[in-house]
Amino acid sequence: MAFSLPPIASLHSPLLEQSIAVLQEYLPSPTPLLDTIDRNIPVSFKQLVAEAPLNRLFAEALAEGEFDDFEGRTIRLEVNGGQPGITIGFWAGRLRVVESPGEATIRGSLAAFKTLAERRQDPDQLFFQRRLVIEGDTELGLALKNLLDSLEWDLSPRRLLFLESV
């Protein structure tokens, strides 16, 4: 007797979505756990894990020079509370993970960053609602926000893990 999985369409049912929403509402935040993990992972490992997917995600924009205005600049992305976070810089045509506080910091909840990445809400609304906050060099942070908002990008795991071509 063979066991079959339900079709993908049935995995997007209202009941499943409501169940996930309830779990997200009442489960404890993963931020403290992520903070502990983040503090114990060396930057060299973060570079190994994050740089290739970032450069793959934005390969077309990098090749077209869209990030050239960010040459030598650093921006930190942080989950509320200061940790976990990652600082990203741009050098020699590549996005790099660096150990630095960053010239600008974009801070928000995991949910706000997920909403931004999935483009489920206008980025300006996330900032006006204070779900995302820019600190430090706000001009640099706004320039990055505007660039990311203007680009087409695919966050599918297959694309990020090099299983699909650009």
Image (cartoon, rainbow, N blue to C red):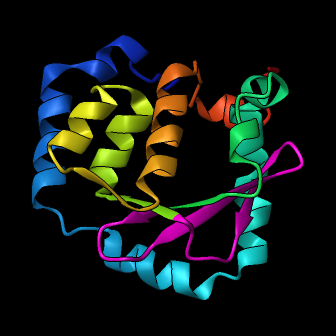
Q: Position of residue 99 (x, y in %)?
A: 68, 77
Which residue is rendered at x = 59% and y = 24% of the image?
154
User: Measuring 71% from the left and 63% from the top, which residue is drawn there?
Assistant: 97
Q: At x 55% / y 76%, what residue is drawn?
A: 101
Magenta-highlighted residues: 77-103
22 or 57, which lies in front?
57
Residue 66 on image: x %, y %: 71, 28
Q: Is residue 73 left or right of residue 143?
A: right
Dividing the picture into quadrants, the one containing residue 43 is bottom right
- In the rendered image, residue 65, in percent from the top left (x then y), is placed at 79, 28
Quick check: can you spot residue 7? no
Along the line of sight, which residue is nearer the eye, 5 or 52?
Answer: 52
Image height of 103 relative to 129, above or below? below
**What residue is shown at x 24% (from left), y 67% (from top)?**
29
Magenta residue check for 55: no
- Does residue 94 belong to the magenta stretch? yes
